[in-house]
Amino acid sequence: MHCGNAASFSFNSSADMINKVWKDSFSCSSRKNSLFECNQTTPLPPDHQTSTAYVNCSGNIEMRLMNGCWGKVRIHVEKKEGDMCADTWTEDKSVKLCEKLNCGMPIKAHNSPRDGDILFKSLHPTSRTTDLTQSIFVKNQDNDNSCNQKPAYVVCSEWRTMVPDKKACSGTVLVHWRQGPSAVSRENFSETEKEKLCQDMDCGGHQSTNESHPQTIEIDSFWNKRFSCGKNPGSIWECENKTTPSRKEPVFIECQKEPNVSLSQGCSGEVRIDGVPVCASNWDLSYAHKVCQEKLCGNAVFIKPKAPSKGSGNIYHVSCEKYHSIIGQCRRTKGKCDTNVVFITCSESVKFRTTEKHGGVLEVNYRDKWERVCPFNPSPVLVRKLCEVSKKENHSISKEDKQVNLETTLEFTDVTMDVKRAVKQRSCGNASPAEILCEGYVKLTPTPTSPSPPSPPSPTSPPPSTSIAPIIVGVGFLLVVIILISVLIRFCVKRARKSKVSSRMLPGKEVEFERGEYENVIDKDNEMEDISRGVRSEAELISEKDGQSVSFLPYEDIEADEARPLTFSGTTAPAARDINVHEDGVTYEEEDSQESYDDIGMIIETAQTTAEVHNSSQTTDDLNTAAPGLVERDEDYLEPDVDG
């Protein structure tokens, strides 16, 4: 029963019995640890139904809540005190405990601690049990750690706690309860009570000073009970009595140590209390705000659990209530942490920059990396604020335009808000990143208008760097233009040479200089058009004398359909023919032996050709003989004899 030793025992008459007598009887020795280990006595003695046994134990069982009317369920037995496991704790047990402590009814707890020194695994009251101390208690085994992070926790409606007003371990003592804060009267609140309160707040002992402390807060009400501690009280609330104080002067307390709350990187990093990391299992954003505000670093903008520092060992578990103004006032206990430690970023550590000088894409650094911001529509006032804070950082030299998922937004409640506190971790997908334009912004891309002369660099700013890439591209483009011009000039020269050679040929003669051979005459109509266009003026000179033109044909491969006399439309004397006429009417040309074409043009311009007509038939041999009026040349053209 965990009640110590038997101080005395007796037998009572069955007339005083309320319940039936248990029919089993036991015979025990001092070496047995439990009644159920003793031997049963059989047969039962004859007077077993006429009397019952009563035992008075040396010890007792006490149950309380750690902070008076709220906190972990604490059980004190056999000079030991520990917590109760929450696995078997029920709402009915909370009701009975709150009533036993005169603390009203149980209410819902906001935050339950995740650490405890478990002494009992469970307790089992009967249906008639009104006092939980009369229950059967099952002790927790030393090697059973299953309940170490699940202590039973109860908050009664008449809960109350005592803390200083502004700091963790010094200040005006206030009692916080369901109706708000009330000051504690200094009446009868001596050094003994102050020492106990400092111990309850884990602030060491009380530090006695003779200094007077002016009242720094406005007090609306006082706690209606005084405090007077006896010997070794469990908490300051065990010192409370029902006497109402008459003095309306508050108690000021100053303990020996104040908890040191720090961040590993100034206004960001790992949260530590007295150099010990804090477990992230019971941490939320309101706790982080308390840390940042206590360190004068603004508000928290980012929380992330991280692996604990090397060799951290047991770390703090922190649980805060709404009335705790700083993290040092919150309840804290050391223990094993199954999760990572707390890492936070305060607004004063947030940095802004732009991708260009005096503007561009806005970037923010609050998670140990630079990242772009979701688009937003800031007012001119907020833009000026963003420009001011971004000037403190060098603009980004990265020109990367790769679209990534944006995970940061800026949320402004009003124009007077600190832009650093507007940073929120909230994704907007693949949206275009936000841009700002500050005073003096110059777009880097070239514009069609003539550029204004660059302003001279300031003495403190470094000279602008010149990129070599545009020079290389320009030189390459110039070389390509020069090559194209050279090719075009050569092409034009060749065309001019060919045109000059063609102009020296007789009109109407189609000649191709290809593989050193003459090609067949294919199209007679084209030849007629060439003759009518190019030879008409010369033919008219010839027709002034005899009205007959001279037709020219190649020597080889004459088609049958082309074996007709070729005459101009203006000829009227069919008998007037060239001396080289075949018997079927076809006229042939012979080459002159001269070496140059230049004589052709001179002969046409200065002389007229006389054609002799022979009406008599000639033999084939006559056709192969050169006419007296023509001179044979090496070239493919016949030239009229100008001697006649």
Image: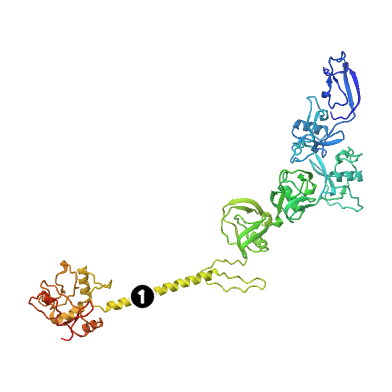
The image shows residue 106 at horizontal and vertical percentages of 77, 35
**In this image, 497 relative to 146: left or right?**
left
The image shows residue 155 at horizontal and vertical percentages of 78, 37
At 83% across and 38% down in the image, what residue appears? Answer: 68
**Within 10 angstroms of label 1, few (less than 14), some, or many (20 or more) residues?**
few
The image shows residue 409 at horizontal and vertical percentages of 63, 53
Q: Is residue 16 above or below residue 316?
A: above
**Between residues 370 and 523, which one lies in front from this camera angle?**
523
Question: Which residue lies most toward the front here?
Answer: 621
Q: Is residue 410 above or below residue 283?
A: below
At 71% across and 50% down in the image, what residue appears? Answer: 343
Dot 1 amino acid type: Cys
Hey, which quadrant is residue 339 in on the image?
top right
Hey, which quadrant is residue 502 in on the image?
bottom left
**Between residues 293 and 147, which one lies in front from this camera angle?**
147
Task: Please say whether residue 190 is visible from this viewpoint.
Answer: no
At 55% across and 70% down in the image, what residue appears? Answer: 468
**In this image, 115 relative to 591: left or right?**
right
* Placement of the C terminus among the 4 image quadrants: bottom left
Task: Please say whether residue 296 is visible from this viewpoint.
Answer: yes
**In this image, 295 relative to 617: left or right?**
right
The image shows residue 143 at horizontal and vertical percentages of 78, 36
Q: Is residue 404 above or below residue 82?
A: below
Q: Which residue position is annotated with label 1? A: 492
Q: In what element is the residue under mark 1?
A: helix
Hey, which quadrant is residue 555 in on the image?
bottom left
**In this image, 360 relative to 306: left or right?**
left
